[in-house]
Image: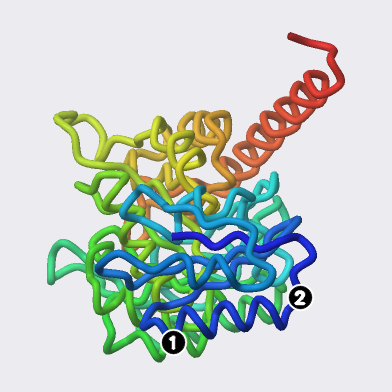
Amino acid sequence: MLVVMHKNASPDEVAKVCALIKEMGLTAHSIPGALRVAIGITGNKEMVDTNRIASMNGVLDIIHVTQPYKLTNREMKAEDTVVSIKEARFGGGNLTVIAGPCAVENEEPYMDVARSVKKYGASMLRGGAFKPRTSPYTFQGLGEEGLKIMAKARAETGLPIVSEAVDTDTFDIVEEYVDMIQIGARNMQNYSLLRRAGRSKKPVLLKRGMSSTIKEFLLAAEYIMSEGNYHIVLCERGIRTFSDYTRFTLDISSIPELKKLTHLPVIADPSHASGKRDMVIPLSRASIAAGADGLIVEVHTDPEQALSDGAQSLTVPMFERMMQEITFITQTIKEHNGKIDKGGDR
């Protein structure tokens, strides 16, 4: 349910409506908009007496949200949410790229990658300190030492950092170091981890599960938002299909569908989707053309020697070319849309 306030409603009137909602045993989520404030209501398991709310000063309308995902729904918030992390902006027409190696292996190579991706336009640094690997015998990450290396790269380059929290046990230590917390595909329906992320003050990068529907994806984000953290970036990272040629199948169609269904920013991960270095740039182009707000890609100075996912990691020259191509696509789309807005093309 959504309570729409008058555009001139005072902060005191908004607070009184929120207080009444709480008094009724429900949860109020204040959602500021460009023109007016809306208040999302969750927690109702039966019919709510909306007359009490409708009679409050400042209330314009009450809208029933039809989908099970409430807070992530565009019915709840029509304007795009922009998630800001220092200078990085996800959503709102910005092209935002997260780049770096799959795993933080040691300091010198990581610093080299950080300097390179900063030079060619990356907005954030990625890197795994705790790695959820399919095999227990493969490299599992450096743990806190890896986070310290990432923090050093942030201090030198000025780029904010994102790394994955693989469980509630390691969440606190990851939260201490990073600017954005990643919830990986294997944990998309780890509800205790989602709730913990919802209680964090740090933005969350939520990846779609490899066998999850769009509805399940949005409901996973709902778990985070229901705990009070509204700073979420969704990531389409590829799903399992009958294809046996690529690691996964990048669901390009999910990007415009998500942009229609939710106000949250959406990025794509062509590295994990394909598992193949030579496919990352074409899939990046396709993702941006489909409306993605950005990308997260793996980059390594020497992919052949990488301890994790070297086959899907771009070289630095490839990353430079990718940035040039997706920037061109973004500018072309903006110019074309500008002509349409001015009545030039139909």
Residue at x 65%, y 43% (from the top left corner):
320
Q: In the figure, 165 relative to 2: above or below?
A: below
Which is more toward the observer, 63 or 88?
Answer: 63
Name the residue tied to disc 1: 23
The residue type indicated by label 1 comes to: Glu
The residue lying toward the viewer, choosing from 180 and 198, is 198
Residue kind at label 2, given as amino acid type: Ser
Task: Indicate the position of residue 29 as horizontal and vertical percent values.
Answer: 51, 73
Q: Who's the residue at 26% across and 40% down the image?
A: 248
The residue lying at 28 percent from left, 85 percent from top is 168
Is 35 placed left or right of 151 in the picture?
Answer: right
User: Where on the picture, by quarter, is residue 161?
Assistant: bottom right
Secondary structure type for disc 2? loop
Where is residue 5? Give x, y as percent: 65, 63
* Quarter of the view holding residue 128: bottom left
Asked if the residue at tag 2 contacts the one at tag 1, i.e. Cβ–Cβ closer than 8 Å, the answer is no
* Quarter of the figure with the N terminus: bottom left
Which mark is on residue 10? 2
Residue 217 relative to residue 175: left or right: left
Q: Badge 1: few (under 14), some or many (20 or more) residues near its Cα, within 10 Å?
A: few
Figure quadrant of the C terminus = top right
Q: Earlier in the sequence, mark 1 or mark 2?
A: 2
Which residue ends up furthest to the top in the rendered image? 346
Residue 51 versus residue 20: which sits nearer the camera?
51
Where disc 1 sits, the SS reads helix
